[in-house]
Image (tube, rainbow, N blue to C red):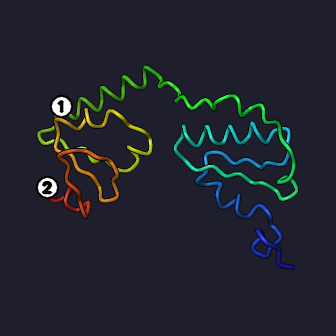
Amino acid sequence: MLLHHTLGNGNFNVFSDMSQGISCVMEKLNDPITVASQIDHALQQCWIQSRPVYLSLPTDVVQKKIEGERLKTPIDLSLPENDPDREAYVVDVVLKYLLAAKNPIILVDACAIRHRVSLIRFLIRPTWNYSIPFQCLNIPRYQRLSNLKILLDK
């Protein structure tokens, strides 16, 4: 028997299984008591991690009523603080190589905007910087590369 959402094999988890490798949160919304907190958690992690989430909502739960009190409280979207020691180490290593380079190049891609990197303009100001074609940042003085081979030829 063919059933919708099973690919005809009877496995109702097939789509959540396919999503598992790319989703940072997977929530099965089975219990009306926990649905609101599960959705809040998924939205929070989607924002913080800049990754997809997967919500599974069974048809028998769609018409159930849930508590609306949570709507009065904003979801905490604050980003976690970096570990100060690790951050200092990374900054030291990056600066060491950047300052030692004769012709430094910083390749900025779409992940910069996806992760809300606001200091990218400050970082690239003293360098020749490049942006790959699908880049969405509005950075003055950048060059678009149609092929990463251009970097290898320089």
How much space separates mark 2 and mark 1, taking CA atoms?
19 Å
Q: Is residue 34 left or right of residue 92?
A: right
**Please, what is the three-letter code of the amino acid marked with disc 1?**
Leu
The residue that appears at 25% across and 64% down in the rendered structure is: 146
**Please, what is the three-letter code of the amino acid marked with disc 2?**
Lys
Q: Residue 99 shows which numbered tag?
A: 1
The residue that appears at 18% across and 31% down in the rendered structure is: 99
Residue at image mark 2: 154
Residue 57 lies, in percent from the top left, at 78, 54
Check disc 2 and report its element: helix, strand or loop. Answer: loop
Asked if 117 appears above or below 57 in the picture, the reply is above
Residue 60 lies, in percent from the top left, at 88, 56
Q: Residue 84 shows which numbered tag?
A: none
In the image as oriented, which residue stretches furthest toward the top? 84
Q: Is residue 41 left or right of residue 78?
A: right
Asked if 73 appears above or below 14 in the picture, the reply is above
The residue that appears at 71% across and 58% down in the rendered structure is: 16
Dividing the picture into quadrants, the one containing residue 21 is: bottom right
Dividing the picture into quadrants, the one containing residue 4 is: bottom right
Check disc 1 and report its element: helix, strand or loop. Answer: helix
Residue 105 lies, in percent from the top left, at 20, 44
